[in-house]
Image (cartoon, helix red, strand yellow):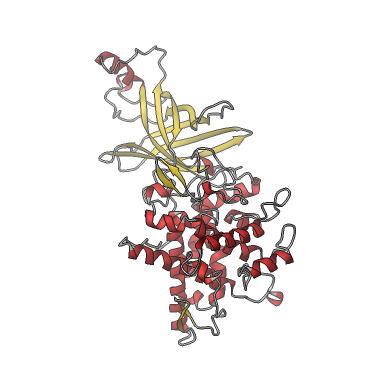
Amino acid sequence: MIYDNLAGNWIYRSFVNLAEVLPELDPKNVIVQDVEKWSRYMFGQGTMVLNPSATGGMAGVFHMGDDIQPLDMTLMGRIDVEGDKTRVRWNAAGLPGTPSDGWLYEYDAHLVSEWPTGNKQVEAFVGSVIRSQPHNDLAPNQRIDQAARAGRVASFLMVRVPFKEPREAIPLPSEMLSMVGSRHHRLHHAIWHGLRDYWVTPGDGEITDDERREIAALGWAPPRANQRPTRGDASGREADNGAGEDFLYMHRLMLLEVRALLNGKGLPPIASWSSIPQPNRDSRNADGFSVPPAWDLAQGEAANKGAALIKSDEYWRSRMTFLERQFKSPEYLATLTLDQLGSKIEWLIHNLMHIRWCSRPVDPEDHQTLLPRGRPLTDTSDKWVQTRLEGKPFYYDDLNDTFSSHVHPVFWRLHGWVDDRIDDWFAAHNAKHSGQVVKDDVMGVPWFLTGAWVSAADPWVGPMAMMHHGAAGDEQAEIAVMQRVYDLIFKPDAPGPTIGRDTKFTQKVLLGG
């Protein structure tokens, strides 16, 4: 069972339980007495930001008042799910030293069931609230209860606030979107990841020998398959093969390409994360880094729980902060080869950051139909490249899909953080093993000479000419080649579902794809 799907902002309104029929209000003929009757029924309102834990606990904050005179309370409670029924019970306590000091309210609510014939139904809670401690009433219109006595019960409803996607909060420049959102760039990124992940994957659906030969003839055979950072015990561990270096190099090249584009257009650079952002479940997403709520991935309970756990505050505190300290520690970095650094970052934290900040995808044509599993992996039709939204170009940007992750604004902050770890690694080795790691220019990218700590003389990005989007050849011919390679990997013509093959980071991390 997942609880994280309730995370985010909910508009709260509570009403006094009076058995009276209220008058109709005519905005063209306002009657003060009628407005006063309506005002008597408002018990309270504001925004509740819910922050569920991975085990069903719930924290949060209740924002009332306004920016000039805020009035907040902290939330603490429990979520219980039985079948298709969700019940939440929680307390709201005032903050010491603020106008809400000493306040205490208790809430009991149920999530409104989804109607099979409902039309664009908005998620909502209905419930009741009791004032558990008396306090001075700050609402002068509440004539029936000026003393704000304990024991007062009201009814309430809460309506979900839609999550503001990063593309709205921190949009990428249109000049950049037209490049990274192109079919050429999407195919390149997806097949680079796909070939590394599945070149030597055993089992049903693996790339056959004939397919390998065709991919090689098209110039796309990867010299190194992807490797997890740990592969068996120390005595029988498979040797590092340089795939971690490929991971770091290819994404550094992507960053350099984008930075050159922005600089050439006179646009500001995209700042890397200096640290992995702290937990934030506010749906308003002011900085673009709020963690979107989880959803049912339609891949089973284990996948749902895994994704929700990665989005939780507990995961950030217990896992991500530890890994960030490790990957910034000179003492630790000085023990790693460049290949080990890349492999560990890719599998231990990079993939997880993609999952943590991914949102529930919707169909790019109507922008409403929910797609629990995202883009069908065999579908690369035009709607997944570019459509229109309110008369403007719209680029599908699921952060959990290698066909689209690099179109998501968080991708460039995340990979900027990854790239900065390379510089930390060099600084650590320069201090600990002076002269053993030497900087070099490799195919136009600031990199390192091979040696004791660097193994790959030719980091792999696919055919180098294709990395630069037709700069050295016919772009449409390159797209045709890449489309063929993509189809060989993901097999759109195969009967039935392809086993163990996906472009999703959740598939790799949670299901062992």
Q: Position of residue 495 (x, y in %)?
A: 73, 49
- Foreground residue among 214 and 17: 214
**332 relative position to 39: left or right:** right
Q: Is residue 305 above or below residue 508?
A: above
- Foreground residue among 354 and 193: 193
Q: Is residue 16 above or below residue 346?
A: above
Q: Which quadrant of the view contains residue 485?
A: bottom right
User: How many circles with numbers are drawn on the protein?
Assistant: 0
Q: Position of residue 30 (x, y in %)?
A: 25, 16
**276 relative position to 210: left or right:** left
Q: Can the viewer see residue 339 in this picture? A: yes
Q: Position of residue 202 (x, y in %)?
A: 73, 63
Q: Is residue 205 above or below residue 83?
A: below
Q: Can the viewer see residue 200 in this picture? A: no
Q: Which quadrant of the view contains residue 49?
A: top left
**482 relative position to 231: left or right:** left
| Quadrant of image for the C terminus | bottom right
Q: Residue at x 51, y 64 (%)?
A: 474
| Quadrant of image for the N terminus | top right
